[in-house]
Amino acid sequence: MKGKSVVEEFLSEPSEVHALGAGFWCSFANLFHPSPLRGLPERLRHELRREYHYLLLGFMLGRLVQVLLLLPLILNNTLL
């Protein structure tokens, strides 16, 4: 019996998708509030702890988007 490939396994469960989205959201919400996940119910926090690697991936993707959004502003100000 052959196991699932990495591509088949990636984001194959709703909890993984939710963790990725929560990480992405946290990367933006963390700019305004130091602990945006603090008010979540215990069930959701447990689910995010179980899929922590997806939470971190979403957070890193969110930070990458922020850098890409700010890069033109930074480059325009340094070129003037």
Image (spheres, rainbow, N blue to C red):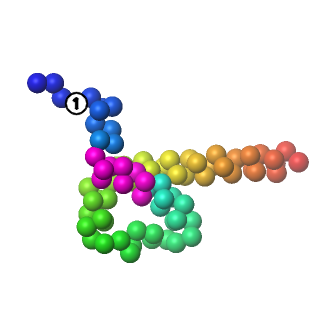
Q: At x 85% / y 45%, what residue is drawn?
A: 79
Q: What main secondary structure does the magenta stretch of the protein show? A: helix
Q: Residue furthest front?
A: 14
Q: Quadrant of the N terminus?
A: top left
Query: Visible in this render: residue 9?
Result: yes
Q: Is residue 26 above or below residue 16?
A: below
Question: Residue 73: where, in percent of width, then height?
Answer: 76, 51
Q: Residue furthest right?
A: 80
Q: At x 30% / y 65%, what residue is drawn?
A: 44
- Identify which residue, 22 or 64, lies in the foreground: 22
Left or right: 17, with 67 as reference point = left
Question: Residue 30: where, in percent of width, then height?
Answer: 52, 65
Describe the element under mark 1 as helix, strand or loop: loop
Q: At x 81% / y 47%, what residue is drawn?
A: 76
Q: Is residue 38 above or below residue 4?
A: below
Quarter of the view holding residue 18: bottom left
Q: Is residue 72 above or below residue 24?
A: above
Give the magenta range. Answer: 13-22
Left or right: 27, with 69 as reference point = left
- Identify which residue, 15 or 59, lies in the foreground: 15
Q: At x 54% / y 60%, what residue is drawn?
A: 28
Question: Residue 69: where, in percent of width, then height?
Answer: 66, 49
Q: Residues within 10 Å of mark 1 (few under 14, many from 20)?
A: few
**Residue 18 lies in magenta, yes or no?**
yes
Which residue is label 1 attached to? 4
Q: Amino acid at mark 1?
A: Lys
